[in-house]
Image (cartoon, coloured by chain):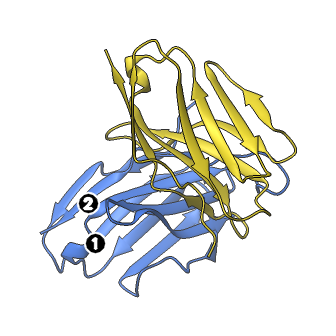
Amino acid sequence: DAGVIQSPRHEVTEMGQEVTLRCKPISGHDYLFWYRQTMMRGLELLIYFNNNVPIDDSGMPEDRFSAKMPNASFSTLKIQPSEPRDSAVYFCASSSGPYVYSNQPQHFGDGTRLSIL
Amino acid sequence: GESVGLHLPTLSVQEGDNSIINCAYSNSASDYFIWYKQESGKGPQFIIDIRSNMDKRQGQRVTVLLNKTVKHLSLQIAATQPGDSAVYFCASPRGGEKLTFGTGTRLTIIP
């Protein structure tokens, strides 16, 4: 089975540019999560969707960040304008059910390593 | 506030030996715990999970133990191999589907 697919794997761009990260969740998974990982702060949840609807975006750092899920098989995380402090590894994860009712762990992609110069 | 995944930062184990990675949590209401393994350049990979109505669960070469009295869980890896070298996280949901991750333990297997 294909896992969570993220693109690009690496992105290097200059500050002020728009950055778009892409994610394809595992087919049939209803939940999609975007995380950011840095040495200083570890893994932070930015936003998550259920059935393509954003449920909690309280982790999104500021208005420069936005996320969309136009359909069940695709999501984007956009940063505009980008800043050097946005440099991090961004992960997408998906799961098939709520924890309360079933043991459905999140499955992660291999991330996008983003460097803003 | 709540915390999950208070780990020792590093652990070195001789190849072939057993390793134990520990994790503490603060919220006694936590009822589901997950262990993830993250290799260099990859995303966290699910290893094993456990519900609070259990105190032990076994997988292939891995065992998770949960002690709710002292709010502690551990991941035991039997007969460690070089491929076990990675960062290991425990995590638990807080409020809906949000997972709280700790800083992790970096396990190094010494050949």
Q: Say few, some or many: other residues with alpha carbon within 10 Å of mark 1 (under 14 / 14 to 19 / 20 or more).
A: some
Which residue corresponds to the image point at 47% horizontal and 18% vertical from the top-left?
A: B80
B83 relative position to A80: left or right: right
- Indicate the chain on which mark 1 is placed: A
Which residue corresponds to the image point at 54% horizontal and 41% vertical from the top-left?
A: B36
- Indicate the chain on which mark 2 is placed: A
Label 1 with label 2: CB-CB less than 8 Å: yes
Q: Say few, some or many: other residues with alpha carbon within 10 Å of mark 2 (under 14 / 14 to 19 / 20 or more).
A: many
Residue B27: give its label: none
| Residue A66 in the image, given as x and y percentages of width and height | 44, 78
Report the amino acid beneath label 2.
Leu
Figure colour of chain A: blue
Front residue (pair A83, A49): A83
- Identify the residue under disc 2: A114
Which residue corresponds to the image point at 45% horizontal and 55% vertical from the top-left?
A: B103
Disc 1 secondary structure class: helix
**Callouts 1 and 2 in the same chain:** yes
Quarter of the image with the C terminus of chain B is top left
Which residue corresponds to the image point at 74% horizontal and 42% vertical from the top-left?
A: B66
Confirm whether residue B72 shows in the render.
yes
- Identify the residue under disc 1: A86
Report the amino acid beneath label 1.
Asp
Front residue (pair A75, A98): A98
| Residue A25 in the image, given as x and y percentages of width and height | 55, 49
B95 relative position to A2: left or right: right
Q: Is residue B25 above or below residue B80?
A: below
Quarter of the image with the N terminus of chain B is bottom right
The chain coloured yellow is B
Q: Which sits earlier in the primary sequence, circle 1 or circle 2?
A: 1
Front residue (pair A20, B87): B87
Disc 2 secondary structure class: strand
